[in-house]
Amino acid sequence: MKTLIKNGRVFDPSQNLDAVMDILVEDGKIKAVATGITEAADEVYDATGLVVTPGLIDMHTHMREPGLEAKEDIISGTMAAAAGGVTTVACMPNTKPVVDSAIIVSGIKQRAAEESYANVEVVGAISKGEKGEELAEMGDMAYRGAVGFSDDGHYVKSSRLFMLAAKYITAFDKPLMLHAIDPELAAEGYMHEGAVSARIGVPGVPSISEDIAVARDCIIAEYAGAHVHICHVASKGAIDIIRQAKKKGINVTSEVTVHHLTLTDEACSNYSSATRVSPPLRSWDHVQAMREAVLDGTVDCIVTDHAPHAPEEKDVEFRYAPCGFCGLETSLGVMLTDLYHTGIFDLKTIISKMSCEPAKVFHLPGGTLKEGSVADITIMDLNKEWTVDSSKFYTRGKFTPYEGKACKGKAVATMLHGNFVMRDGVVCTKK
Ligand SMILES: [Zn+2]
């Protein structure tokens, strides 16, 4: 199978490439990137006026399999990914059972190989059952292809257990991906602690609950020589600790979510459960600090923390709602609307942090359009105007704080291993 993508603006930060060119794809690989390719192909895709980038990579999602399929499964979750222009998702292990053994890693990878619309990378648990008591079989899971390890949803509270994990993991060259929030400081809060929480009468989570946790994790990373990746940083104090740690040469990387770059705690002021998330949406000073950290390189990856829940779970009062909402179908559009078209980030920053850098940090194929690499490609229309309408989403968890948002910019085609999995917003269902 040969596909020729003609006349697109080929935009690949991994090669500093930004020019109108053609891309020839053959047998799942990028065969040539050049101007005026005339070779005959089975299909010619006219990308005139469109931007062709490496497929987007989202290192923090919840596909909810096994066991929580009322919220999402690998099919619905990866269809949402394809619809949003995302070709690789990493799925977190807080499933039922928890992904804490090699057989579950293999099972998810097998199921994804058979049925998914995106590459699925599996994150294994650090501790058995994510209970924070005993190490999970990380070595075995690493051999089965786990991309990293996390007790996401929980902080690894015991410093001793975390230190053991950090020492152990150095043998496998995989990161520990940390949900770094001190649970005792966060336990009694439902949103960011600040002026808005005081005004609307909801107990708050202080941002220092992140700062303290991140500081400990960076100290242990240095001591053990381990790679730690701090998930969904949302506090200006925490991001500054990561900045200092990087300067010291500690092997720490970080990610920030689209919502922590674009929304403040004001979004919670109508008590909508669609705005409840952990870490919580914070005040404007924190949002600004996250944006600066993306620009100065403290942040390596932009992620969604796509965390769908069943409608009956989320359709309750603010404080009873579980944390998290869907993100795969809005991430690119929101980034382009709020950060690219406003001139805050350039396109290179966005594509680097949503594709090239995650590939580098986690040693993944993709994240590039170099000849010979896997043909995972996102084609986007930077000026396409559309409105967020969750009733049209592929994900099962329809709640989003962006409902009704007018967006400019969208993925219009997604190619996975050389085959289109989405065209014009419609996922190409498998035969
Ligand atoms: Zn988390």
Image: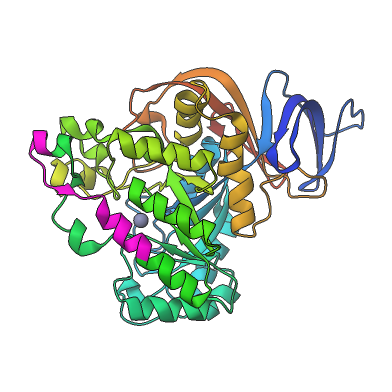
The quarter of the rendered structure image containing the N terminus is top right
Question: Does residue 157 show up magenta in the picture?
Answer: no
Q: Is residue 184 above or below residue 293?
A: below
The quarter of the rendered structure image containing the C terminus is top right
x and y, in percent, of residue 252 in the image: 50, 61
Q: Is residue 99 visible?
A: no
Q: Is residue 140 visible?
A: yes
Ligand 1 lies in quarter: bottom left
x and y, in percent, of residue 426 in the image: 54, 31
Looking at the rendered structure, the number of numbered marks drawn on it comes to 0
Q: Is residue 245 above or below residue 46?
A: below
Q: Of 272 and 15, which appears nearest the observer? A: 15
Kindly indicate the quadrant of the structure image that contains residue 230.
bottom left
Identify the residue shown where x is 16% and y is 35%: 195
Q: Is residue 106 above or below residue 47?
A: below
Question: Does residue 205 show up magenta in the picture?
Answer: yes
Identify the residue shown where x is 33% and y is 40%: 286
Q: Main secondary structure of the magenta part?
A: helix
Identify the residue shown where x is 73% and y is 49%: 374
Identify the residue shown where x is 61% and y is 49%: 357
Q: Magenta region: which residues?
A: 198-215
What sort of colour scheme is used for the picture?
rainbow
x and y, in percent, of residue 184 in the image: 19, 63
Q: Of 296 and 420, which appears nearest the observer? A: 296
x and y, in percent, of residue 100 in the image: 42, 74
